[in-house]
């Protein structure tokens, strides 16, 4: 018997948790605790996690797990003793080893049992033991769940050695209506939680696990459910917007953040002087959204209004004073932005660029000015390859980092690029140059929009590739979770721009470009003869191409399909994209032929791998078996057509042509001895197989594909 089942509630009360990480922390805590309990047999015989509900506020992480047992089920434990051969003598009497084992188990010899395994027969003492009680199991499970939380930085508090993302102040654990005596984070669990820090900062006794959130809301003025709290803020924002005939701009991301900052949300509206509407809308939104966590309000046409909404964590008796206080703070920030922008717009970017000589990019790589020189050289080269204006790309690249020296970007870093665009427009730069200065930072994150126009794209690619090449060259290579220069994101950005913008760009050629005299000479501490990538060029190319797996997996492509194309190491991401999509379509449309050829290719790869060096070309005159002659005939007919298709990037037709080899290849393996005793026959047949192998490798190494797995 595992004892009565009831819902289990666990809550950890803390100092204010980081709002951006709150949801991930809460979900991870709930999932890890449920998984640990399931492994201990506390959630049913299936071992699957029971239904759970997680809660998260700035001061608490909590989870309620359904139908948790009061104790583990009884367990049958086998304690293995000596082998039967060592347990009995020739007369069949127990040896000293057997008697000693029985004594250590506290049972007579008659109670011992025999078990046979692949390794032999043994004496065992089999006993049934009661499972551990919930308190004992929960202690270990809690410790395990807390260790696995995604918290890169932990802290200590007081004089103890306990570490957590924030100091913990209370612990609650209820199994139904019964408090569970458990310890974690240096705290003993009870049945008490705490209410709102200002409105109800007192202990609240929770009668049972199911009463948790209702009690907190009624007596503690805390909405524990993150989704409910978020929905309430959203409703309040909508009401404010309707009243002003406006809409809330940039709502979703900020809504999640603000929900993680409050326990009892009270949304209010404020206003600011219309004169600040002369500021760039990006600057206005940044001051409100990024710095003050306010929601900008916009008219139906999208233009910002001199109004905003904000979420307070208290229900004030004087909301007017709260509103005025927030308006006063925003007014000061907008005045700063106005002052900095007016000052910055007076200085041309060309002059600002000189100030980059005093800003370090990397100790071993020189200044941001030197980086802009390298970006300009590479951007001009890429633009030429794309048939775009190389001089325009160089000019944009030279100026693209200049606004880093501006006071506006110094105060509001998230506006880098935006301020550069306004300065460029102010001082007569072309629209393309101004757009490139702003958009070369795109995409900034997953799902972000991409830069438009080949000049802009040339600068965006050059900036990322320069960081990848030079930082790899000085050993700043990402490992594990460590990626301080966001090089994985830079590589993924390169791939997205090339693939989604349909750019015919060869990454290996661009990496090779860094070996030229002009590029290397721009790097501090390196001679012109130095190859920036050197032996690491292949490593860097692999690093970039490895990001393709993360790019395509969410789209539904199988890991084997990606690996099949990846094995051919195409240097052009757009070419990779075409190969992968054609291969996926091939397996969906001609599954039987594709699976048969995949198996044959795997067999061919194994044969050629064991055979060692083989001739590149076969001699038709040396073919004697009917099946191999038939295969060669088909190979000559389809091979040339497939090669023409592949050379033109038409992988669909090329693979379709090769699908006709299915029957001849199957017949060849059924009727022909590849590894014939005669050396000439053997080498000629191996050369025939190599021809088939090379044909497929022009598209993908389909030996990576598993025939037994159905294509999606």
Image (cartoon, rainbow, N blue to C red):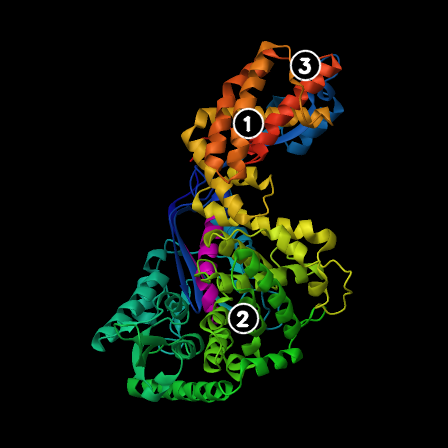
Question: Which label's residue is closer to the chain start, 3 or 1?
Answer: 3
Q: Main secondary structure of the magenta part?
A: helix
Does 457 lie within the magenta span? no
Q: Kindly identify the residue that appears in the image at 62 percent across and 81 percent down.
A: 355
Find residue 396 and name its label: 2
**Sequence-earlier tag: 2 or 1:** 2
Q: Residue at the location (62% across, 29% down)?
A: 107
Q: Around disc 1, counting alpha carbons within 10 Å, would you say few (fewer than 14), some (14 to 19), or many (20 or more)? A: many
User: Up-down: is 344 above or below 74?
Assistant: below
Magenta-highlighted residues: 9-35
For disc 3, the marked residue is 622
Residue drawn where x is 63% and y is 73% of the image: 368
Q: Which residue is mark 1?
A: 639
Question: Which of the 4 quarters of the picture holds residue 106?
Answer: top right
Find residue 477 and name its label. Answer: none
Image location of residue 620, percent across then percent down: 64, 17
In terms of secondary structure, where does tag 1 sit?
A: helix
Helix, strand or loop at mark 2: helix
Up/down of 489 relative to 156, above or below? above
Q: Are marks 2 and 1 in contact (CB under 8 Å)?
A: no
Q: Residue 524 at x, y = what percent?
A: 73, 70
Neighbor class of circle 3 (other Cα within 10 Å; few <14, some 14-19, many 20+) is few
- Check disc 2: other Cα within 10 Å, few if <14, some if 14-19, many if 20+: many
User: In the depicted view, which residue is nearer to us: 299 or 16?
Assistant: 299
Looking at this view, is 311 or 603 the one in front?
603
Tell me, yes or no, if residue 40 can be seen here.
no
């Amino acid at each position: 018997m595992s004892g009565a089942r009831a819902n289990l509630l666990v809550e950890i009360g803390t100092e204010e948790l980081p709002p951006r990480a709150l949801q991930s922390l809460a979900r991870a805590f709930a999932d890890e605790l449920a998984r640990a309990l399931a492994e201990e047999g506390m959630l049913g015989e299936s071992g699957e996690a029971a239904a759970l509900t997680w809660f998260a506020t700035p001061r608490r992480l909590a989870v309620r797990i359904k139908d948790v047992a009061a104790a583990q089920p009884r367990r049958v434990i086998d304690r293995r003793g000596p082998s039967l051969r060592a347990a009995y003598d020739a007369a069949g009497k127990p040896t000293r080893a057997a008697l000693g084992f029985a004594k250590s188990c506290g049972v007579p010899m008659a109670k011992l049992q025999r078990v046979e395994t692949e390794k032999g027969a043994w004496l065992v003492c089999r006993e049934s033991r009661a499972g551990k009680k919930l308190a004992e199991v929960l202690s270990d499970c809690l410790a395990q769940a807390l260790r696995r939380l995604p918290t890169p930085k932990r802290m200590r508090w007081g004089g103890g050695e306990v570490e957590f993302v924030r100091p913990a102040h209370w612990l609650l654990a209820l199994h139904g209506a019964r408090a569970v005596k458990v310890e974690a984070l240096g705290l003993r669990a009870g049945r008490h939680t705490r209410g709102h820090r200002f409105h109800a900062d007192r202990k609240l006794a929770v009668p049972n696990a199911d009463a948790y959130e209702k009690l907190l809301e009624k007596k503690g003025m805390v909405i524990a459910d993150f989704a409910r709290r978020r929905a309430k803020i959203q409703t309040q924002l909508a009401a404010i917007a309707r009243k002003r005939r406006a809409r809330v701009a940039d709502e979703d991301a900020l809504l999640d953040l603000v929900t993680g900052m409050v326990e009892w949300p009270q949304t209010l509206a404020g206003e600011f002087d219309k004169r600040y509407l002369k500021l760039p809308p990006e600057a206005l939104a940044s001051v409100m959204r990024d710095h003050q966590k306010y929601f900008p309000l916009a008219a139906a046409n999208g233009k910002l209004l001199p109004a905003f909404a904000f979420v307070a964590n208290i229900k004030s008796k004087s909301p007017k004073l709260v509103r005025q206080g927030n308006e006063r703070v925003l007014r000061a920030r907008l005045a700063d932005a106005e002052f900095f922008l007016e000052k910055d717009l007076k200085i041309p970017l060309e002059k600002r660029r000189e100030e980059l000589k005093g800003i370090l990019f990397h100790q071993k790589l020189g200044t941001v000015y030197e980086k802009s020189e390298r970006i300009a050289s590479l951007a001009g080269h890429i633009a030429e390859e794309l048939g775009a204006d190389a001089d325009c790309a160089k000019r944009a690249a030279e100026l693209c980092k200049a606004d880093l020296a501006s006071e506006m970007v110094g105060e509001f870093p998230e506006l880098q690029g935006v301020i550069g665009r306004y300065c460029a427009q102010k001082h007569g730069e072309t629209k393309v140059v101004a757009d490139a200065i702003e958009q070369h930072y795109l995409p900034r994150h997953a799902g972000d929009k991409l830069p438009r126009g080949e000049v802009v794209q040339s600068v965006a690619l050059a900036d990322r590739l320069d960081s990848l090449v030079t930082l790899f060259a000085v050993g700043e290579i990402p490992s594990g979770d460590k990626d301080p220069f966001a090089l994985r994101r830079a590589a993924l950005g390169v791939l997205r721009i090339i693939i989604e913008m349909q750019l015919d760009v060869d990454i290996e050629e661009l990496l090779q470009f860094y070996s030229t005299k002009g590029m290397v000479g721009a790097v501090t501490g390196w001679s012109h003869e130095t190859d920036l990538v050197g032996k690491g060029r292949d490593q860097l190319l692999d690093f970039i191409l490895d990001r393709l797996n993360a790019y395509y997996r969410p789209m539904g492509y199988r890991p084997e399909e990606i690996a099949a194309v990846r094995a051919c190491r195409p240097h052009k991401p757009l070419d990779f994209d075409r190969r992968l999509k054609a291969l996926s379509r091939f397996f969906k449309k001609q599954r039987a032929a594709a699976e048969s050829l995949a198996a044959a290719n795997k067999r061919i790869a194994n044969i050629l791998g064991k055979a060692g060096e083989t001739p590149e070309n076969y001699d038709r005159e040396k073919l004697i078996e009917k099946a191999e002659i038939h295969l060669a005939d088909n190979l000559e007919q389809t091979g040339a057509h497939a090669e023409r298709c592949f050379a033109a990037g038409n992988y669909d037709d090329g693979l379709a042509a090769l699908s006709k080899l299915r029957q001849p290849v199957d017949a060849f393996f059924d009727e022909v001895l590849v590894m014939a005793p005669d050396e000439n026959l053997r080498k000629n047949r191996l050369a025939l197989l190599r021809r088939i192998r090379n044909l497929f490798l022009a598209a993908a190494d389909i030996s990576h594909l598993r025939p037994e797995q159905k294509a999606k």
